[in-house]
Structure formats: C-alpha cells, structure tokens
Image: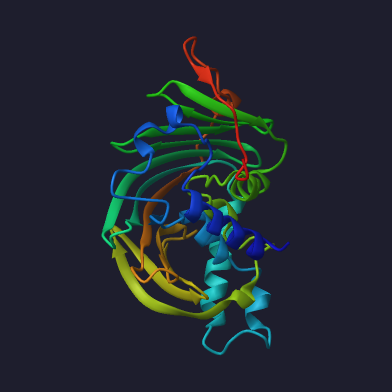
C-alpha cells in the first residue's frame, strides 16, 4: 500500500475511534470524549492530514501529469524547505498549536496546546505536548518508543528500530498515534506523490510575529493546506495550517513554530527512565 493510501486509512480509523496511542481510560483521563460528544465527534488529525500534502521531489512538479493549476516554483519551495530541515544535525522546536473538534451537535471547539520538541536525527526524538487538559511526553532513542503521562503516572512503550520517518509512519498506520509536529520530519520526503496536489501557488509575503515569511497555499482532494516559510537565509517553516474538506464544518489545524538550530543533546535526553511509582500499561494497535 502506498503512503497516501495507508494514511487515508489511518485517518478514517482515528476519526471513528478517537482512540490514539493508548486505549486505556486510566491513561487518557480528561482526554476522553466529553458529555455531549460521541464517536461521531471529529478532530482535525494534524500529522495524518499533513502527510497527505507532502511532495515527492522538485522534478515531479515539472512532469506533464502535474496540473496547470500547480505552480512548480511553489512546490519546489516546499521541497527545498523540507531538504533544509532534513539536513539539520540537531534542532529544537517550540510550537503553539490549535485544532478544531466538531461535536455531534455541529458546534466547533478549538483546543490549544504548546509543544516543545528536541530532535537529533536519525533516531533521537523527545516531544512534550502540554495543555490545561493533559501533558504527554514522547521519547524515542532508536530502540524504544515511549509515551509518558507525568500527571497520571502511566506510560506505554514498544521496541522499534529505525529512523524517525519510519517510526512516525508506523505509529500512524499501526497504532493510530500521531507524533506531534511529525510534518517537520516528513515534508518533501521521497515517498510522497506530487500528483495528489491539484492546486498550489505563491500567495505573497506575510508577517508571522516578527518574521517576514513567504506564504504558499495548496489543495488536494479533501485537504487545503498552507505554509509560511521564513524569508531569512536558510528559510525554515514559520507556520502551517490544514483544513479538512471532508467535514462541512471545515475543522482546521494550525501551528506556529520557531526552530532553533545547532543545539546539542546528550543521548540520555531521548531515553525514558520511569519513576518508581510509574505504572506501565499495554500498548495496543489500532485494531485492538
């Protein structure tokens, strides 16, 4: 199955179950569906949707199969940004994220979260995701992936040997778990298909906080997405947004990111050592 097909399948499962990485009420706590919501409640699935929007390579944008509505220079700009990201030896990311949830009543709620990620390719990752509703920390050291809930005291883990991209795709396909900000590790990777993009263009410049950025907009079947790339030398993403067109409420995910390069991390940064009172719970796949 192609990346595109498997991610579409994963998106359907996540919408239906709203389960995620760990299917245990003791771990989820306040993240369980609220009264008034149901299995029909839908949230924008940030990484799964964004992965649909990645492009194969700048050469693909110039093929005869590419729609005339797609500006090859816009596609090439995103590809080049992805190449710059993947060339970084280590970096940290601070992000302010918002995601819409559509209730059965049609009411749309917006959830806000702060994310801090430390990254040391090819296999070092630590992501802390914090909101007033929950706190989760994801660890990966190249051999073991762990999701830890400091507030609840529960954690779950699996053995996995591979690069960050492989871990992210496996987590999405097999476990219905979206690694926060996974877009940053996959953008422009060579497994994606530029033919899925049906429209894309350069919008102009825009201010994202104190940064001047180039603004690009793209459309695929069922997905609209935009990205703002810093105009400074070595331009990296400043912000991106994704709209789910399959839902008439048009729920949106947005992230404003600030990337710090040249940071150094010890390997211990990506290893989880459980506290004495921590409780390990089973790691279930999306089919369990």
Q: Position of residue 201 (x, y in %)?
A: 46, 80
Give 35 or 136, whichever is nearer the viewer. 35
Q: Residue at x 49, y 54 (%)?
A: 16
| Residue 255 position by quadrant | bottom left
**Position of residue 285 in the picture relative to residue 46 (left or right):** right
Give 152 or 242, whichever is nearer the viewer. 152
Instruction: Tell me the quarter of the image containing the C terminus.
Output: top right
Residue 55 seen? yes
Q: Position of residue 252 (x, y in %)?
A: 36, 62
**Position of residue 60 in the picture relative to residue 199 (left or right):** right
Instruction: Tell me the quarter of the image containing the N terminus.
Output: bottom right
Q: Position of residue 67 (x, y in %)?
A: 58, 87
| Residue 28 position by quadrant | top left
Q: Position of residue 138 (x, y in %)?
A: 51, 34
Give 197 or 204, whichever is nearer the viewer. 197
27 vs 184: above or below: above
Residue 209 seen? no
Q: Residue at x 68, y 88 (%)?
A: 64
């Amino acid at each position: 199955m192609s990346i595109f097909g498997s991610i579409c399948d994963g998106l359907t499962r996540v919408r239906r179950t709203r389960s995620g990485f760990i299917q245990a009420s003791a771990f989820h706590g306040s993240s369980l569906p609220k009264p008034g919501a149901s299995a029909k409640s839908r949230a924008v699935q940030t990484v799964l949707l964004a992965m649909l929007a990645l492009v194969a390579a700048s050469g693909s944008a110039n093929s005869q199969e590419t729609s005339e509505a797609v500006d090859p220079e816009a596609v090439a700009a995103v590809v080049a940004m992805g190449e710059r990201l993947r060339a970084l030896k280590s970096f940290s990311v601070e992000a302010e994220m918002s995601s819409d949830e559509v209730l059965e009543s049609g009411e749309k709620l917006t959830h806000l979260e702060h994310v801090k990620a430390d990254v040391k390719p090819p296999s070092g990752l630590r992501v802390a995701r914090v909101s007033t509703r929950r706190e989760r920390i994801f660890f990966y050291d190249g051999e073991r992936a762990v999701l830890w809930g400091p507030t609840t005291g529960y954690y779950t883990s699996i053995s996995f040997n591979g690069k960050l991209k492989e871990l992210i795709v496996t987590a999405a396909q097999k476990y219905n778990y979206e690694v926060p900000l996974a877009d940053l590790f996959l953008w422009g990777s060579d497994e994606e298909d530029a033919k899925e993009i049906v429209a894309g263009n350069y919008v102009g410049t825009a201010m994202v906080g104190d940064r001047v950025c180039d603004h690009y907009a793209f459309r695929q079947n069922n997905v609209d997405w935009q990205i703002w790339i810093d105009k400074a030398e070595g331009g990296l993403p400043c912000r991106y947004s994704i709209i789910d067109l399959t839902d008439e409420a048009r729920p949106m995910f947005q992230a404003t990111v600030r990337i710090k390069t040249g940071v150094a991390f010890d390997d211990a940064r990506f290893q989880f050592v459980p506290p004495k009172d921590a409780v390990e719970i089973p790691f279930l796949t999306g089919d369990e």
